[in-house]
Image (tube, rainbow, N blue to C red):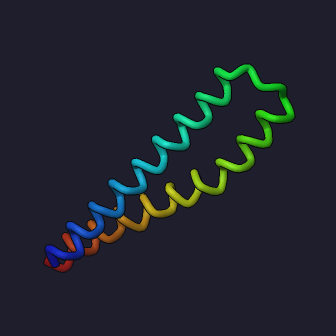
């Protein structure tokens, strides 16, 4: 069960890095003083990646909880 716990922790950590990357990209786009349409385009491109990172984080945390419950 340790593999499930540590695997889930690794997945969660990777997804956290993905979310921080999304935050940095949006902050850079906002600081670049882009026109409204270009800013919306950047946000639309980043949104699926942010949602995927959030989903992976939830899956990783579920793996940790299941590993703890089974051990």
Residue 58 image position (x, y, % from top left): 43, 61
Residue 27 image position (x, y, % from top left): 59, 28
Would residue 66 be found to the left or right of residue 15 on screen?
Answer: left
Residue 2 appears in view: yes
* Among the 4 quarters of the image, the one containing residue 10: bottom left
Residue 19 image position (x, y, % from top left): 48, 46
Residue 21 image position (x, y, % from top left): 49, 43
The residue lying at 27 percent from left, 66 percent from top is 64
- Pick the quarter of the image with the C terminus: bottom left
Q: Is residue 32 above or below residue 40?
A: above
- Pick the quarter of the image with the N terminus: bottom left
Would residue 31 be found to the left or right of residue 70 on screen?
Answer: right
Would residue 14 be found to the left or right of residue 31 on screen?
Answer: left
The residue lying at 66 percent from left, 30 percent from top is 29
* Among the 4 quarters of the image, the one containing residue 5: bottom left
Would residue 68 be found to the left or right of residue 23 on screen?
Answer: left
Most distant residue in the right direction: 37
Q: Nearer the viewer, residue 53 or 42?
A: 42
The residue lying at 77 percent from left, 25 percent from top is 34
Q: How many marks?
A: 0
Residue 65 appears in view: no
The residue lying at 23 percent from left, 75 percent from top is 4
């Amino acid at each position: 069960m340790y593999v499930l716990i540590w695997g889930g922790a690794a997945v969660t950590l990777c997804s956290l890095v993905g979310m921080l990357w999304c935050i940095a990209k949006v902050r850079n786009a906002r600081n670049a003083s882009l026109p409204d349409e270009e800013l919306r385009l950047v946000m639309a491109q980043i949104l699926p990646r942010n949602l995927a990172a959030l989903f992976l984080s939830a899956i990783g945390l579920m793996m940790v909880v299941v590993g703890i419950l089974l051990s």
